[in-house]
Amino acid sequence: MTRSVRRTHRIRRTARVAGAGAAALLALSACSSSSDTDSDSAGASSSSPKLSGQVTVFAAASLKESFTTLGETFEKQHPGTEVTFNFAGSDTLAASITGGAPADVFASASPKTMATVTDAGAAAGTPATFVRNQLEIATLPGNPDHVSSLEDLTDSGLKVVLCDESVPCGAAARKALDASGLELTPVSYEQDVKAALTKVELKEADAAVVYKTDVKAAGDKVTGVDFPESAKAVNDYPITLLKDAPNTDAARAFIALVKSAEGQRVLTGAGFRTP
């Protein structure tokens, strides 16, 4: 074999080896790229689990308008979920939860009623205060009786309604009355703040001591009257995940929405105060 033939054979062998090496590198690169993509997809999936199913929220009656709005927002953000609410007096809700009623989230109108749930070991973790609320007098539209103070409600000619003292709005009203040294005998005690407000809306009462948020939600059906003693009876609203929540992941996400900037905008827009 001549020298030029041997050189030609060497060149061909080198080309074959180089080609095989390049092919191996391309295959390795493709495998690595595919692996990285799969890894990223798995990471994204595990960090953002898809939420689904029903979320049951037990919430104080005064939260009805704002929480209904937030429930609709939550369902749009998480297709496949459904938020179901039970709005009532906080004490009634607390009793239902400790009695075994299935629920995911509890939002109370006072720390005292929340304590009923936490003391029974029915809460998961420590409740967080997410808003505050203050009392206001709701009168008939236009305030025909010229109510301008808490003391005016003691006039025997007025039919006044209060929340029962077992519920947060009633306990707050009692605290405000005690702070002013006033005694007031209402025509009825109602089991939640919406029931008290309804008495005025239906003109079955001349005035009621309710929350600012409820007066705002009622629009022109009532007229609101501020009174200074309400500053001594501001209610903190705590929220918590419940220990036996049937849908823990979605419940945590709903609580996160309530506490988020978006949630706080809805709540303050309804008349609540930030903590």
Image (spheres, helix red, strand yellow):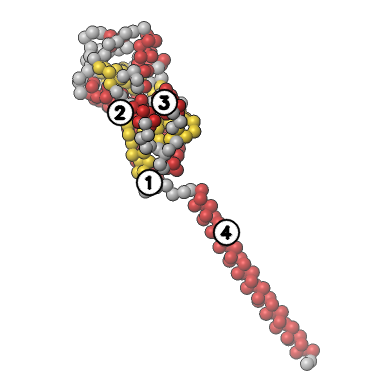
Front: mark 2 or 4: 4
Q: Quadrant of residue 116?
A: top left
For the residues marked 3 and 2, what is the alpha-carbon distance in whole angstroms?
A: 28 Å
Residue linked to disc 2 = 217
| Residue drawn at x 74%, y 83% as measured from the top left | 10
Q: Label 1 near label 2: C-beta < 8 Å? A: no
For the residues marked 2 and 4, what is the alpha-carbon distance in whole angstroms?
A: 53 Å
Residue linked to disc 3 = 116
Q: Earlier in the sequence, mark 3 or mark 2?
A: 3
Q: Earlier in the sequence, mark 4 or mark 1?
A: 4
User: Given the image, on which type of amino acid does mark 2 rest?
Assistant: Ala
Q: Earlier in the sequence, mark 3 or mark 1?
A: 1
Residue linked to disc 1 = 53
Residue 11 vs 225, above or below: the answer is: below
User: What element does badge 1 sit on?
Assistant: strand
Residue linked to disc 4 = 36
Q: Position of residue 48 (x, y in %)?
A: 48, 48
Q: Label 4 near label 2: C-beta < 8 Å? A: no
For the residues marked 2 and 1, what is the alpha-carbon distance in whole angstroms?
A: 30 Å
Q: Mark 3, residues whose alpha carbon is within 10 Å: few (<14), some, or many (≥20)?
A: some
